[in-house]
Amino acid sequence: MRTDAEIREKLRKIEALFAGATTPGERQAAEAARERIQERLKKFEETQNPEEWRFALENPWSRQLFVALARRYGLTPFRRHGQRRTSVMITAPRGFVEGTLIPEFDELNRVLVEHLNALATEIIASAIAADTSEPDEVAALPP
């Protein structure tokens, strides 16, 4: 399992990748990556009208990650009155959402969920029972 420092570095590298980093020094500069992505958003805002987007994120960690990522790039996540807590709304240009935000979120979310699953499995195995495998599948009961 990865350490906390390793998972943080992996997340920084993913952001640098989506910002278009080309050298090892750039990949380590998460702030520069964030600024490049914000510049990309500004360019999209100059050429495309913003659209309202709704995302349904059941997993609370994924929702928290999405909200943080949106805020990192200057977007304002919100939820309309009456919407479920799993809904997150943003207003942003289509090119940015489809070309940068969603692909970056998907990759970051994959790494985060993988890490949290490994951590949960380790904790359950050490505190409850070592066998955390899926249950056996048995034949259906006759009608």
Image (spheres, rainbow, N blue to C red):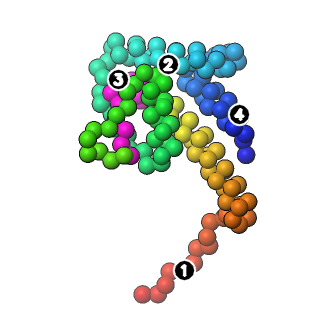
- Which picture quadrant has residue 109? top right
Sequence-wise, the earlier of marks 3 and 1 is 3
Sequence-wise, the earlier of marks 2 and 3 is 2
Q: Nearer the viewer, mark 4 or mark 3?
A: 4
x then y, percent, for residue 60 = 48, 46
Question: At numbered mark 3, what does the secondary structure look like: helix, strand or loop?
Answer: strand
Separation of marks 4 and 3 at Cα, in angstroms: 33 Å
Question: At numbered mark 4, what does the secondary structure look like: helix, strand or loop?
Answer: helix
Q: Quadrant of the C terminus?
A: bottom left
The residue pinned by badge 2 equals 37
x then y, percent, for residue 107 = 55, 36
In magenta stretch: residue 89: yes
Camera-nearest residue between 89 and 43: 89
Separation of marks 4 and 2 at Cα, in angstroms: 23 Å
Q: Specify whether 91 is left or right of 33.
A: left
Q: Residue at x 67, y 36 (%)?
A: 7
The residue pinned by badge 3 equals 93
Question: At numbered mark 1, what does the secondary structure look like: helix, strand or loop?
Answer: loop
Residue extending furthest toward the bottom: 143
Sequence-wise, the earlier of marks 4 and 2 is 4
Q: Is residue 131 visible?
A: no
Instruction: Give the extent of the magenta segment.
Output: 86-100
The residue pinned by badge 1 equals 139
Q: Residues within 10 Å of mark 4 (few under 14, many from 20)?
A: few
Q: Specify whether 105 is left or right of 79.
A: right
In magenta stretch: residue 2: no
Number of the label disc, if any, that sits on residue 5 = 4
Amino acid residing under circle 2: Ile
Q: Is residue 132 visible?
A: yes
